[in-house]
Image (tube, rainbow, N blue to C red):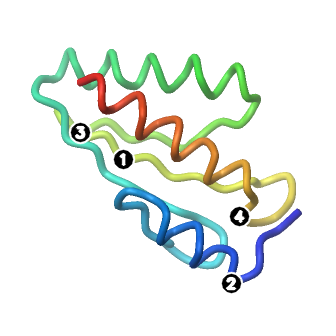
């Protein structure tokens, strides 16, 4: 179910640095210490995404990993996006 603007803002307040890009996406940039660590982080996110069947858009620029989330099959932001965001934040803490 698509979240209302109020629900999106409440979820963003509970998130660690995620921002709304437009009505349909949230985004965060993660900076890793090295390129190999960035790739390890992306591989860990890929495992989480596959297990959840909810896949992010990921851009890797050396040590910077940009992640964007949206539930495309529902046409916008859902709770799945914020649950994935929290899972990626927890994964990032290991680096």
Q: Is 43 left, or right, of 63 in this rendering?
A: right
Mark 3 and mark 4: Cα distance apart in space: 25 Å
Residue ranking furthest to the left: 33
Mark in the foreground, 2 or 4: 2
Does 38 sit above or below residue 88?
above
Q: Which residue is mark 3?
A: 61
Q: Earlier in the sequence, mark 3 or mark 2?
A: 2
Residue ranking furthest to the bottom: 6
Q: Which residue is mark 4?
A: 77
- Evaluate if marks 3 and 2 touch, with contact meaning CB atoms under 8 Å apart: no
User: 62 or 82, which lies in front?
Assistant: 82
Q: Quadrant of residue 50?
A: top right
Q: Residues within 10 Å of mark 2 (few under 14, many from 20)?
A: few
Question: In percent of the image, x 52 and y 44: which residue is there?
Answer: 86
Q: Earlier in the sequence, mark 3 or mark 4?
A: 3
Mark in the foreground, 3 or 4: 4
Find numbered disc 4 in the image and state the secondary structure of the residue it sits on: loop
Q: Which residue is mark 1?
A: 66
Mark 2 and mark 4: Cα distance apart in space: 10 Å
Q: Quadrant of residue 31?
A: top left
Mark 1 and mark 4: Cα distance apart in space: 17 Å
Question: In percent of the image, x 11 and y 23: which residue is there?
Answer: 34
């Amino acid at each position: 179910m698509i979240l209302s603007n109020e629900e999106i803002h409440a979820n963003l307040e509970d998130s660690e640095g995620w921002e709304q890009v437009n009505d349909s996406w949230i985004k965060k940039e993660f900076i890793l210490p090295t390129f190999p660590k960035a790739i390890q982080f992306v591989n860990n996110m890929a495992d989480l995404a596959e297990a959840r069947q909810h896949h992010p858009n990921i851009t890797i620029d050396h040590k910077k990993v940009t992640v964007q989330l949206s539930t495309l099959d529902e046409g916008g932001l859902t709770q799945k996006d914020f649950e994935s965001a929290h899972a990626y934040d927890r994964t990032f803490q290991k680096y």
